[in-house]
Amino acid sequence: MRGRISILHLERGLILFTLLAIVWVTGCGEEEKTEPVYLIDYTSEGIPGSSLKVWFSGEVISVRFNGQPARRIYYDEEKGLWTAKWKLPDKDELARSGMRINGYISVYVEWTDEMGGTRHERIILPCGCCSWPEVLRTIPMDRAEVDAEEINRKGIIVVFSEPISLKISGDVFVLRNSSGKRLKWEVWWSSDNSTAILKPKEGMELKPGEKYTLTIKDYFDLAGNEGVEVKVAFTTKST
């Protein structure tokens, strides 16, 4: 009797083991390990309006550049890789879009592979024609407290990162006191137009114990790139 029970237990154990093995094999067969698709290469002249081409490590079904769909997605037979093409915005579009970094173009690439996986990466493209002039330093500096008589004598100094085109630049410097009145100061430029010195006209001198704001705007480099508006606020010491 005990022998029959042992054999019965053994048979049941073998059946259970077989069923578990079948389930395990079936389950493993259903799992498909897929590698993520990466952006592995790109090329562009870095010129506004030119083409940008990117290559991926696997098949992609959707690619967006800064939120805009790719112009074309295809399999590159020569490289053996999936690729997507997009046209960079022109110069005016770059200035409006915020994609422009001084000397570079920033492109946010987002793609979806055939399994529905989504990844993204930011590309920074060198762009010589995307640079613009910057205000490197001013005397007085922003939020400085200065001696009015000294500034009246030595002038306000503004140093730019590159020569400024006086032909296409507008009214670059606007100096106002705390009541909003504009003070008329003459502008003297260095020989290469990269540094400006502002001197007061008669009756327009700084006064002690006052707050002033210098706005630097509407300035362009020799290539026609416009600089970002800068405001310098300073106060003069009381006597």
Image (cartoon, grey):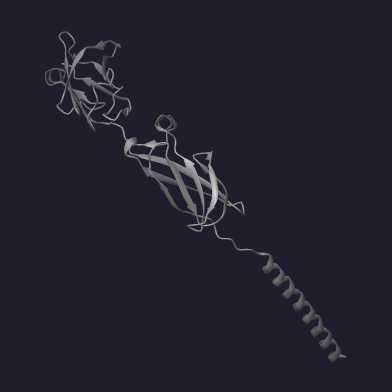
Q: Which residue shows up at 84% across the image and 87% down it? A: 5
Nearer-the-camera pick, 192 or 227: 192
Q: Is residue 184 above or below residue 192?
A: above
> Where is the C terminus found, in terms of image quarters?
top left
Q: Which residue shows up at 55% across the image and 60% down it? A: 35
- Residue 197 point in image, percent of width and height: 17, 22
Q: Is residue 74 left or right of residue 104?
A: right
Q: Is residue 69 above or below residue 173?
A: below
> Where is the N terminus found, in terms of image quarters?
bottom right
Residue furthest to the front in view is: 78
Identify the image quadrant of residue 178: top left
Residue furthest to the right in view is: 1
Numbered marks: total: 0
- Residue 149 point in image, percent of width and height: 13, 17
Nearer-the-camera pick, 220 or 49: 49
Q: Is residue 227 left or right of residue 111?
A: left
Q: Is residue 60 left or right of residue 21?
A: left
Q: Is residue 171 above or below residue 221?
A: above
- Residue 6 point in image, percent of width and height: 81, 87
- Residue 95 point in image, percent of width and height: 40, 30
Q: Is residue 67 left or right of residue 162?
A: right
Q: Is residue 130 above or below residue 191?
A: below
Q: Which residue shows up at 33% across the image and 28% down it? A: 228
Identify the image quadrant of residue 151: top left
